[in-house]
Image (cartoon, rainbow, N blue to C red):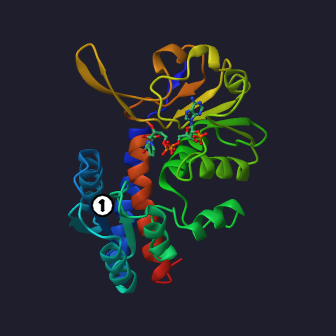
């Protein structure tokens, strides 16, 4: 049986070291890292995500400022708030929880955030920097996934990594990071032919699709390492549960290691948001 990659335990260790770092920044530099979190509208899942992020900030000593705006908020109002926060030197990181209501263009919002405060790493300049290997702010989910892979496998050089999904927030940055680790990278997506065949050649398989339990045992190579980014809520046996894009129970006997859902990539995403916030605060204060 393959090993279960414990993302929660890794995220707890990372958070513990960040907590010490925050305490040292406060004591030695009078610098308390801070993040502003903006939530527009009533999406229940977004409320849960924001609550978890704010709670994690408190645990680490990072200051969090919440802006909860009504779903009627106009794009102009949101952009004005972002500009105020860009100018506020007491705010190190800005996160606008996606999705935003239809009347707001999410690209315009993301690109209005000062790149050095873009702790989600979605700004076009941060995306471009990653694509050319001059990493600035790296998106949290791919960053956390890479940390888990390196912890599990050490040197990734020469391995064939297949990434299922090509979104700007997960698939594409994940592929760039794996390329930087000298993997041979294949990205597959909804138009790919022979997707199962390609996945079966992967030493590392990252699934970021949004289809519950899509990846079955016959999609994976024996001994592969699997990172399951997917978070899908399904009704099963009369219960609501979270499952990944990988059929964990089906693949685990065949693979070297795999992340579970929940408890795999999810906790790493929040921990890496804290990591990016601390890094942003240090950079803005000129602390190496
Ligand atoms: P998107 O919907 O933006 O992208 C999904 C990708 O999957 C697209 O590139 C799409 O291809 C591809 N795809 C869709 N159907 C298929 C198919 N049948 N075969 C192969 N590829 C397919 O999703 P995200 O990247 O934002 O998120 C992916 C998953 O990860 C979701 O479940 C999301 O909830 C989860 N997630 C988890 C996070 C965490 O913290 N663990 C953070 C962020 C996301 P195409 O481009 O051709 O349409």
Looking at the rendered image, the quarter that the N terminus falls into is top right
**Looking at this view, is 247 or 224 the one in front?**
247
Q: Is residue 31 above or below residue 238?
A: below
Q: Is ligand 1 closer than 8 angstroms to the Cβ of mark 1? A: no
Q: Is residue 104 above or below residue 56?
A: below
Classify mark 1: residues with Cα within 10 Å, few (<14), some (14-19) or many (20+): some
Which secondary structure lies at badge 1? helix
Q: Is residue 252 above or below residue 135?
A: above
Percent across and percent down for residue 3 are 52, 24
Residue 9 visible in rendering: no
Looking at the rendered image, the quarter that the C terminus falls into is bottom right
Residue shown at the point (74%, 25%) measured from the top left: 201
Q: Is residue 227 left or right of residue 28?
A: right
Percent across and percent down for residue 148 are 53, 42
**How many discs appear?**
1
Percent across and percent down for residue 227 are 54, 34
Residue 173 visible in rendering: yes
Residue shown at the point (51%, 25%) measured from the top left: 246
Q: Is residue 100 left or right of residue 283?
A: left
Q: Is residue 209 above or below residue 28?
A: above
User: Which picture quadrant has residue 103?
Assistant: bottom left
Q: Which residue is mark 1?
A: 60
Percent across and percent down for residue 99 are 37, 54
């Amino acid at each position: 049986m393959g090993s279960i990659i414990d993302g929660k335990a890794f995220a707890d260790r990372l958070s513990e070291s960040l907590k010490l770092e925050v305490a040292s920044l406060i004591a030695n530099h009078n610098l308390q890292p801070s993040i502003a979190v903006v939530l527009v509208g009533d999406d229940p899942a977004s409320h849960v995500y924001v609550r978890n992020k704010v709670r994690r900030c408190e645990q680490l000593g990072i200051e969090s400022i919440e802006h909860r705006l009504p779903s009627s908020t106009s794009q102009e109002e949101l952009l004005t708030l972002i500009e105020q926060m860009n100018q506020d030197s007491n705010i190190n990181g800005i996160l606008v929880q996606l999705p935003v209501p239809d009347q707001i263009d999410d690209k315009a919002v993301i690109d209005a955030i000062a790149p050095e405060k873009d702790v989600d790493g979605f700004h076009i300049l941060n995306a471009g920097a990653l694509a050319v290997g001059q990493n600035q702010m790296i998106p949290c989910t791919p960053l956390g996934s890479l940390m888990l892979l390196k912890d599990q496998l050490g040197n990734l050089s020469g391995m064939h990594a297949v990434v299922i999904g090509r979104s700007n927030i997960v698939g594409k940055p994940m592929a760039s990071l794996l390329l930087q680790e000298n993997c041979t990278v294949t990205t597959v997506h909804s138009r790919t032919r022979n997707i199962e065949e390609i996945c079966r050649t992967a030493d590392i398989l990252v699934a970021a699709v949004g289809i519950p339990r899509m990846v079955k045992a016959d999609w994976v190579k024996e001994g592969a390492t699997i990172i399951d980014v997917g978070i899908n809520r399904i009704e099963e046996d009369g219960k609501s549960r979270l499952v990944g894009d990988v059929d964990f129970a089906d693949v685990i006997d065949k693979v070297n290691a795999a992340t579970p859902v929940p408890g795999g990539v999810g906790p790493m995403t929040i921990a890496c948001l804290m990591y990016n916030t601390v890094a942003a605060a240090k950079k803005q204060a000129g602390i190496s």
